[in-house]
Image (tube, grey):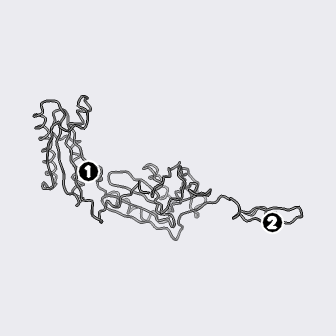
Amino acid sequence: MTVRQRLAQAPQAAVIFGRDGLIALVLGCCLPVAWAADYGTGLSDTTWQLEANEYYCKFYQPIPQYGLAVFFHEAGEELEFYLQATRNQMALGQAALTVEAPDWRSSALTHELGYVRVQDRDIPLRVEPDRARRIMGELANGMAPTFTRQARYGSESIRVQVSPVEFKSYYNDYLACSAGLLPVNFSQVERTVVNYPSGGELLDNTAQSVLDDLVAYVAADERILALEVVGHSDNVGTRYDNRRLSERRANRVTDYLVEQGVDPSIILTDYQGDRYPIAYNNTAAGRSANRRTTILVVRDSGDADDPLNGLPDFDAR
């Protein structure tokens, strides 16, 4: 191959041939050539870490100079996956999600898993449960999930790749954490509601199941300060009868909680009859919603060691 041919094929360079046969080489740094900024780990520097408690499992891989690739499973919720960036370098829009072979498995086929929205957040990419489970499965098979998007500033591409190295070594630990999660999280029980048929006050199987989940959470969380139990009714019947009915509803809930082991000293019981509807009483659906007992869970959240401080903030910028 001649010098002229080698220079013509040189990457990231432009070759200019003058009339006198002289050759000028212009390096690619002076031309607007597209390139990719890759973030990921390799065989020797991949680590997986697990934060495990009754409230959530956080199974994650630090990605040098980028941030974290995180599987997050909160009690009462499904698994999700997200990328947490030290500084988001991707343009807002849609990032391509592919499953690629790592360098040592170059013969494996690439799979496309669609697109993931990039937002202006500390957690710019968040993947829903179905694809989060798919990503976890692909890592278990030795494949590398990869997110690609144009850079926020510039024309190059940003690629973030999650490495499968050592994934299986920690996967069973994640499964053990997941199996030990509470049935519900605090946001799901913070305002618990039990509903009734017209004139009813007994706790059916659905109501007992709801209260059992609340009891399980209260037993696990030492920061619970009080449970405020308040009975309500629709406006069918006299105000006096409705007040008495709401009283019986509240007392039955309180009695059930105590029977299941909740400390009675933290329970405050009240009843309001039909004074505080949450829906219009002129429809069947509205009256059904108003026939209720609510349990407000009061929790001390001022402790710096509160495990719920580890929940991701998807709105932080």
Residue extending furthest toward the right: 20
Sort mark 1 into few (<14), some (14-19) or many (20+) by Cα contacts within 10 Å. Answer: some
Q: Is residue 154 left or right of residue 15?
A: left
Kindly check if marks 2 and 1 are in contact, taking CB atoms under 8 A apart as contact: no
Image coordinates of residue 307 in percent, x first then y, are 31, 62
Residue 136 shows up from this direction: no
Image coordinates of residue 293 in percent, x first then y, are 19, 42
- Look at 22% across and 55% down and name the residue there: 218
Image coordinates of residue 21 in percent, x first then y, are 88, 64
Secondary structure under tag 1 reads: loop
Q: Is residue 13 left or right of residue 47?
A: right
Specify the amino acid type for callout 2: Ala
Q: How many marks?
A: 2
Q: CA distance from mark 2 to mark 1?
A: 72 Å
Query: Which of the 4 image quarters holds residue 170?
Result: bottom left
- Look at 15% across and 33% down and name the residue there: 199
Residue 58 shows up from this direction: yes
Q: Which residue is mark 2?
A: 24
Which label belongs to residue 123?
none
Reply above or below: 191 against 304.
Answer: above
Q: Which residue is mark 1?
A: 190
- In the rendered structure, which disc, 2 or 1, sits on the residue that comes first in sequence? 2
Q: Nearer the viewer, residue 74 or 21?
A: 21
Q: Nearer the viewer, residue 306 or 282?
A: 282
* Eye-nearest disc, 2 or 1: 2
Q: Give the position of the N terminus as an image quadrant.
A: bottom right
- Look at 88% across and 61% down and name the residue there: 19
Q: Nearer the viewer, residue 41 or 117?
A: 117
Reply above or below: 238 against 226.
Answer: above
Specify the amino acid type for callout 1: Glu
